[in-house]
Amino acid sequence: MKPERAYLADILDQSEFITRQVRRIEREEFFLDEVLSRALLHSLLIIGEAANRLSPEFLDRSQDIPWPKIVALRNRIVHDYAGIDLELIWNICDRDIPALADSVRSQLETGQAQ
């Protein structure tokens, strides 16, 4: 198992990728660009998988981040791929992911993860 810092680095990397992509386009473009929507779904899947591998002790220390919701989104993408609501995905990418990146970056900078 990788150290938590490595999982957090994966989450930060994917979050920054999503944030860069969302900032460069308009909302309507997201719905028309199948390659981009699939790329962002894949990044969300990686974020959820990395979050799922964080230790319970770390999760207890960082309750400001909605880890269970992040893992639940990963499960939804994997197991209910046909029912994915792209409007919801856009909103998560546009509103929630930049804040996640900020929180994870702060945890990495302050040494909260091992």
Image: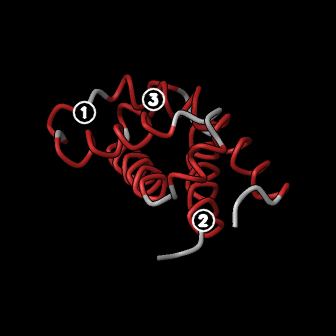
Q: Nearer the viewer, mark 2 or mark 1?
A: 2
Residue highlighted by disc 1:
84
Q: CA distance from mark 2 to mark 3?
A: 27 Å
Q: CA distance from mark 3 to mark 1?
A: 11 Å
Secondary structure beneath dot 1 equals: loop
Q: Quadrant of residue 87?
A: top left
Task: From the viewer's side, name the closer residue of 83 and 67.
Answer: 67
For image coordinates 64% across by 46% down, the residue present is 20
Instruction: Count numbered badges in the picture.
Output: 3
Task: From the viewer's side, name the closer residue of 74 and 53.
Answer: 53
Q: Inspect the image, locate mark 3, and give the three-letter code of the amino acid beneath it.
A: Trp
Q: Quadrant of residue 73?
A: top left
Q: Nearer the viewer, mark 2 or mark 3?
A: 2
Residue 4 image label? 2
For image coordinates 40% across by 31% down, the residue present is 89
- In primary-sequence order, the first of circles 2 and 1 is 2
Residue highlighted by disc 3:
90
Q: CA distance from mark 2 to mark 1?
A: 29 Å
